[in-house]
Amino acid sequence: MKVAALSTLFLAGASAFAPSAQTGRTSTQLRMGFESEIGAQEPLGYWDPLNLCVNQPQERFDQLRYVELKHGRIAMLAVSGYLLNLSGTRLPGAIDYEGLTFDQIPTGFGALKAIPQEGLLQIIAFIGFLELFVMKDVKGKGEFPGDFRNGIDFGWNNLSEEEKRTKRSIELNNGRAAQMGILGLMVHEQLGNLKYIIPDPVFYPGAVN
């Protein structure tokens, strides 16, 4: 179920700290900065207030960038799923053999308590399957952190270098915004004032105070 998947997507964040296999980039030269990398753009430019990448090799930067991309992708799914369910969208039918229907599952944190344990285990298993076998650079031919094409072009090679850089920048920035967005939704739900910041949502009764 979408609302359940949204809630358990947060669990996948822990695995985002696992290093990515990016064999296409092998430089071990130490660098003082990465000012020309994707994401270093106006108005902040290159920003590393904790000096995490000072005197670090390219591999360290790539690992941190992979973690950032992965969290961003999870957050984009989380925001989309949260708002979709908050609008009242639900799957038809029942979620278990006892007759609990999908539209009886609340939005957000409440879903974790309402979904049967077997359902949660299935969702976690599905996320684990994607993590281990699908969402990764299986063939080790990724051109950059987060490149999971695995030999399928998807039209990427038809783009100019400028277009590729633009699309990668858009994804990175959308992911950064989504991380702040899902954090805001989670905090406001717990504060009980989510209905004041989202105009006219179709709330499921009891989903949000």
Image (cartoon, grey):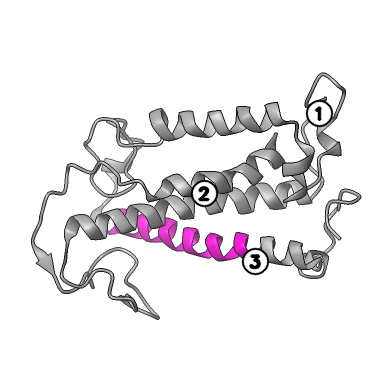
Q: Earlier in the sequence, mark 3 or mark 1?
A: 1
Q: What kind of residue is marked 2?
A: Ile
Task: Determine whether the residue tagged by mark 3 lies in a helix, strand or loop.
Answer: helix
User: Is label 2 in contact with label 1 (beta carbons under 8 Å)?
Assistant: no
Q: Earlier in the sequence, mark 2 or mark 1?
A: 2
Question: In percent of the image, x 71 and y 31: which residue is there?
Answer: 117
Q: Nearer the viewer, mark 3 or mark 1?
A: 3
Question: In percent of the image, x 86 and y 53: which residue is there?
Answer: 203
Residue identified by numbered label 1 = 92
Figure quadrant of residue 191: bottom right
Query: Can residue 44 be seen by looking at this rendering?
Result: yes
Callout 2 crowding tier (Cα within 10 Å): few <14, some 14–19, many ≥20: many
- Nearer-the-camera pick, 76 or 127: 127
Q: Which residues are magenta?
A: 162-185
- Image quadrant for the C terminus? bottom right
Confirm whether the magenta stretch covers residue 169: yes
Left or right: residue 109 compared with residue 40 = right
Task: Determine whether the residue tagged by mark 1 lies in a helix, strand or loop.
Answer: loop
Residue identified by numbered label 3 = 184
Left or right: residue 198 compared with residue 10 = right
